[in-house]
Amino acid sequence: MSSLASEEKSYTFSSFNEFEESFEYKGERLYSMIFERNKENIKVSKEKFAVRNLEKIFDATFLISPKIGFEAMSLRDLSAETGLSMGGLYSSIASKEAIAIMVKDVVAVICGEIVKTSMAQQNPLDALRNLVRGYLFASTLMQPWFNFLYFETKSLPPLEQVASKNLELEQVNALVTILKSLKPDSDIDIEFVSTMALSLIQERYVKPWKHHEPLTTIDKYAEDCLSLIYKSIDYQLS
């Protein structure tokens, strides 16, 4: 497996708590990033007010959308839930569609970083562990965002829909590359194993109603996923 260590930061983490401590996309910093990446379409010029409005808008979206669906949700619904006037909404988002695009952008940034930092590992076993744990832990911390994109990709413009679907393909392709490095002469269907492994990870954020355990169990879930992957490719830990 080729290393990107000279270009991207390289690190390993062994637990959800360790990952969470270094995870940058939360709280005010998350919404500041959204503002910076979309400020040409945001009419609120002062960042602190834009950040406050964006947080209200996304919190309300993730509250309303699972109940009635994003397509049925109106800006008036958002106005009522956020306490922002219609003018206040339009000063922060150009349209309802812009919300879905911003969600996709946030998830894309996070997934892209997970893939790059995982592929930066010199050891393919470290790369596999980082990719599985990273995607699982990040999607746990950002469950409403990942869940929204999974179910509402259809609400995106056509080109953005393709970009959203490509995020999943990038995760699968990274797994394929790593697993082939671990078992280069294997006759096992690595692509199938990679696809099923990703589905296991997605299970946690797609069906939160099935996983009510304390977050501490996320570490065991990660190790169970990794163990199943090892067995699927007949890889023996030394």
Image (cartoon, helix red, strand yellow):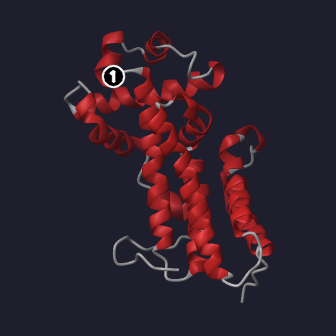
* Viewport quadrant of the C terminus: bottom right
Q: Position of residue 175 (x, y in %)?
A: 61, 66
The one nearer the camera, 167 or 110, is 167
The one nearer the camera, 160 or 135, is 160
At a point 43% along the width and 21% down the height, the residue shown is 96
Can you see residue 1?
Answer: yes
Q: Position of residue 110 (x, y in %)?
A: 46, 53
Q: Which quadrant of the figure has residue 205? A: top right
The residue tagged 1 is: 94
> Residue reaching furthest left?
45
At a point 59% along the width and 43% down the height, the residue shown is 143
Q: Which quadrant of the figure has residue 200? A: bottom right
Look at the picture and state if 105 lies above or below 19.
above
Q: Which quadrant of the figure has residue 133? A: bottom right
At a point 35% along the width and 18% down the height, the residue shown is 89
The one nearer the camera, 9 or 29, is 9
Characterize the local packing of mark 1: few (<14), some (14-19) or many (20 or more) Cα atoms within 10 angstroms.
Answer: few
Disc 1, SS: loop
Left-right relation of 17 to 204: left
Can you see residue 220?
Answer: no
Look at the picture and state if 211 lies above or below 42.
below
